[in-house]
């Protein structure tokens, strides 16, 4: 399972030119992190949602999940993110910030 998370926009377009991104091959993570991601995915219900197209909004989240050769991509305006999905996106946003600090 591979995940690609992107946050674009933000205050003053901070992430418009240089989006905040996080990519991970989940099996490469320690078991505890794998379990946390699996739990957040299950709680979010995102996997069972129909893919949603990207919009032309000022702040967007894009989430792609590739598993067993199939990819599902969801894009949401910041205000359209379902409540159940918000903890998952907050988790990946924090990981993306940490990753950017370490680069």
Image: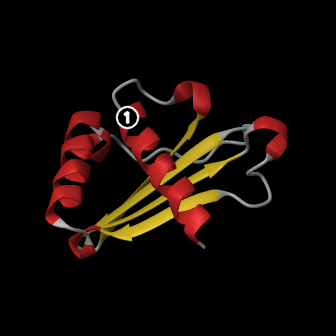
Image spot of residue 28 (x, y percent) = 25, 76
**25 sits left or right of 76 in the view:** left
**Residue drawn at point x = 59 percent, y = 25 percent:** 79
At 38% from the left and 69% from the top, the residue drawn is 24
Residue 88, how many percent across, how many down?
37, 41
Q: Which residue is mark 1?
A: 87
Residue 74 visible from this viewpoint = no
Left/right of residue 59 with respect to residue 87 in the rendered view: right
> Which of the 4 quarters of the picture holds residue 69?
bottom left
Q: As rendered, which of 63 and 40 lies closer to the eye?
A: 40
Colour scheme employed for the rendering of this structure = secondary structure
From the image, which quarter does the N terminus lie in?
bottom left
**In the image, is residue 23 above or below residue 19?**
below
In the rendered image, the residue lying farthest to the right is 12
Q: Quadrant of residue 3?
A: bottom left
Which residue sits at x=85%, y=39%? 12
Residue 37 appears left or right of 15 = left
* Quadrant (top left, top right, bottom left, bottom right) of the C terminus: bottom right
How many discs appear?
1
- Residue 67 left/right relative to 23: left
Most extreme residue toward the front is: 102
Does residue 36 show up? yes
Residue at x 37% of width, y 34% of height: 87
Nearer to the camera, 74 or 14: 14
In the image, residue 65 sits, relative to residue 48, either above or below, namely below
Element carrying mark 1 = helix
Is 87 above or below relative to 50?
Answer: above
Residue density around tag 1, few if under 14, some if 14–19, many if 20 or more, within 10 Å = some
Name the spot of residue 62 as percent of width and height, x first. Answer: 53, 50
């Amino acid at each position: 399972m591979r995940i690609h998370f992107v946050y674009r926009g933000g205050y003053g377009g901070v992430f418009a030119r240089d989006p905040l991104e996080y990519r991970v091959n989940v099996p490469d993570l320690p078991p505890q992190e794998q379990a946390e991601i699996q739990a957040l995915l299950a709680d979010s219900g995102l996997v069972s949602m129909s893919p949603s197209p990207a919009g032309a909004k000022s702040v967007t989240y894009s989430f792609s999940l590739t598993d067993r050769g199939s990819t599902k991509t969801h894009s949401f305006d910041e205000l359209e993110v379902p409540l159940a999905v918000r903890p998952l996106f907050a988790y990946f946003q924090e990981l993306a910030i940490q990753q950017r600090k370490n680069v």
